[in-house]
Image: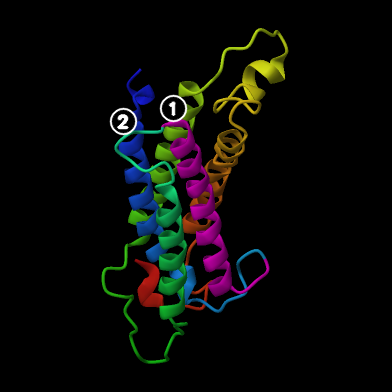
Amino acid sequence: MLILDIRVRYILLGLLTTLNFLYYFNSPLTYSDAIECVGIECRPFSLINNLMMFTFLAAMMVSMGILNKSLFIPTYWFIPVIILGYVMIFLDWRNKKIVRPRPGRITPPPEGFLPKTRRLLLIMGILLVHMALFFGNYSSHKVKVDSDIFSELIFWSAFGSFKERPGAFMTGWLSILGILWSMVNIFFTESFFPQKFNLPNSWRI
């Protein structure tokens, strides 16, 4: 299968990382002070949300880095990438300010801001690529075991197995939460309306 080729999986990882950062940098919730995000203010929620999404992506990087060592790529290539990712997310969040409607005045969205339909397509794309990459990694590094126990066949033998590669095993399974988190973000993206989040009506695009 094509998805089992490590080169294809690294291309998908690069694509997934790019899509994730496009989504992080275009979240309208970063500009909102409404308390409409699971009971907390949306601005800090957006930071938590983006950091969690990146954490599950970082877990996938770690698992792939451990299981797919190369003579041409440093073993721990993912460490500076992950650190840079967290720094970029925080700096982007810190540099954006709360925006509120101004009576009688039009407040356009930021330059380059993605419309709701494109944001929805973006997060759906993230979900599909994350699912494909997760199952590609799962299938590529499943260890054969001499057992008929369901948990041994399906769970403990995945990602190089818990016994042989505990780090890759734990981060590999942690990355599955990125699929669930993308589903949550599909809900927030689809249900976005400026008035609900105390943002200018011109942001309804």
Badges 1 and 2: C-beta atoms under 8 Å apart?
A: yes
The residue carrying mark 1 is 136
| Sequence-earlier tag: 1 or 2 | 2
Was residue 57 drawn as part of the magenta stretch in this picture? yes
Left or right of residue 36, residue 74 in this image: left
What residue is drawn where x is 42% and y is 38%?
Answer: 128
What residue is drawn where x is 64% and y is 16%?
Answer: 153
Identify the main secondary structure in magenta: helix
Left or right of residue 10, residue 190 in this image: right
Residue sitting at the far right: 149
User: In terms of depth relative to the viewer, which is nearer, 27 or 54?
Assistant: 54
**Residue 103 tag number:** none
Task: Report x, y in % for residue 183.
Answer: 53, 46
Crowd class of label 1 (few under 14; some 14 to 19; many from 20; radius 10 Å): some
Location of the N terminus (image quadrant): top left
What residue is drawn where x is 61% and y is 21%?
Answer: 157
Task: Report x, y in % for residue 98.
Answer: 47, 82
Was residue 125 drawn as part of the magenta stretch in this picture? no
What residue is drawn where x is 45% and y is 22%?
Answer: 140
Quarter-of-image position of residue 155: top right
The residue carrying mark 2 is 8
Crowd class of label 2 (few under 14; some 14 to 19; many from 20; radius 10 Å): some
Location of the C terminus (image quadrant): bottom left
Quarter-of-image position of residue 174: top right
Q: Is residue 109 above or below residue 152?
A: below
Instruction: For residue 194, say whether it is visible.
Output: no
Check disc 2 and give the amino acid type.
Val
Looking at the rendering, the stretch of residues picked out in magenta corresponds to: 39-68
